Every structure is written in C-alpha cells, then in structure tokens.
Image (cartoon, grey):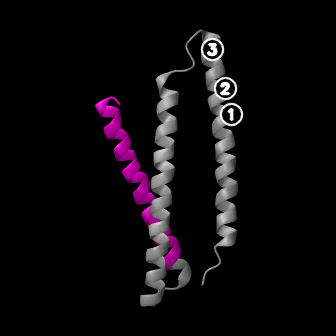
Amino acid sequence: MIELTPVLVLVVIFGFTYGIIALLVRRKERMALIEKGVDASGLEFKQSVNYYALKIGLLCIGVAIGLIIGATLVETTTLNNEAAYFSMIFLFGGIGLVVSHFMEKKERKEGI
C-alpha cells in the first residue's frame, strides 16, 4: 500500500500557503479600491467565495473517487501502486475542477 501521509502533508502545506497568499492579495485589492473611493464590498468578492467552495468540494469528491478507482486498479490489474493512485487522483480531481468551471459559467450566465 502506498504511504499517503507525506503527500497529504505537502498538500495541506501548499493549500494553507496558497490560502494565506490569496487572502493577502484580496486585502490589498480591497484597500486599493477603498483608496480610489470605490465600494469594496462589490459583487465579485461575494461570488468568488461561493465558487471557491464549489471548486474545493468538487475537487475533494474527484480525489475521493480517484482514490477508490486507484485502489480498484491496484487490486484488479498489474499496475503499480504509484501509477494507479496518482493517475486516478489527478484524473478525477481535474474532472471535478472542469465540472466546477462549467457550473460556475452556467451560474454567471443566469445572473445568480
């Protein structure tokens, strides 16, 4: 069985780093908008939070499906552990992000 602890630790570290950087950038953008006299509580900030949750949720679902299919491939085929797990995680995680993109695009067209 593949040891997933180091991989998960790296994902968490990079995720937190990305989150902190994104929050700092958003704060700087808001401060720049306030300095220009524009209302900083604009619609684009509210929509990004909702879509961010959608993206993360679908990515997690995709990764979980990828882990299940990867485990099935390891048991039923001659693929080695790393190839089966990582390929399925990236495949289904990517599919989850593509689905979230199209859902977000549909929501923006409808004007919600």
Q: Residue 59, image x and y in percent?
A: 48, 56
Residue placed under numbered mark 3 in the picture: 34
Magenta highlight range: 84-112
Q: Which mark is residue 24?
A: 1
Q: Which mark is residue 59?
A: none
In 3D space, how far apart are the residues under numbered discs 1 and 3 (Cα atoms)?
15 Å
Q: SS at mark 2? A: helix
Q: Type of residue at label 1?
A: Leu
In 3D space, how far apart are the residues under numbered discs 1 and 2 (Cα atoms)?
6 Å
In 3D space, how far apart are the residues under numbered discs 3 and 2 (Cα atoms)?
10 Å
| Foreground pick, 53 / 96 | 53
> Does the image show residue 77?
no
Residue placed under numbered mark 2 in the picture: 28
User: Looking at the image, how many numbered discs can be counted on the residues?
Assistant: 3
Q: SS at mark 3? A: helix
**Looking at the image, do the residues carrying marks 1 and 2 touch, with CB atoms under 8 Å apart?**
yes
Identify which residue is drawn at 65% across, 65% down. 8
Q: Which of marks 3 and 1 precedes in the sequence?
A: 1
Q: Quadrant of residue 104?
A: top left
- Mark 3 Cα-neighbour bin, 10 Å: few <14, some 14–19, many ≥20: few
Identify which residue is drawn at 64% across, 73% down. 4
Q: SS at mark 1? A: helix
Identify which residue is drawn at 55% across, 20% down. 41
Q: Residue 42, image x and y in percent?
A: 51, 21
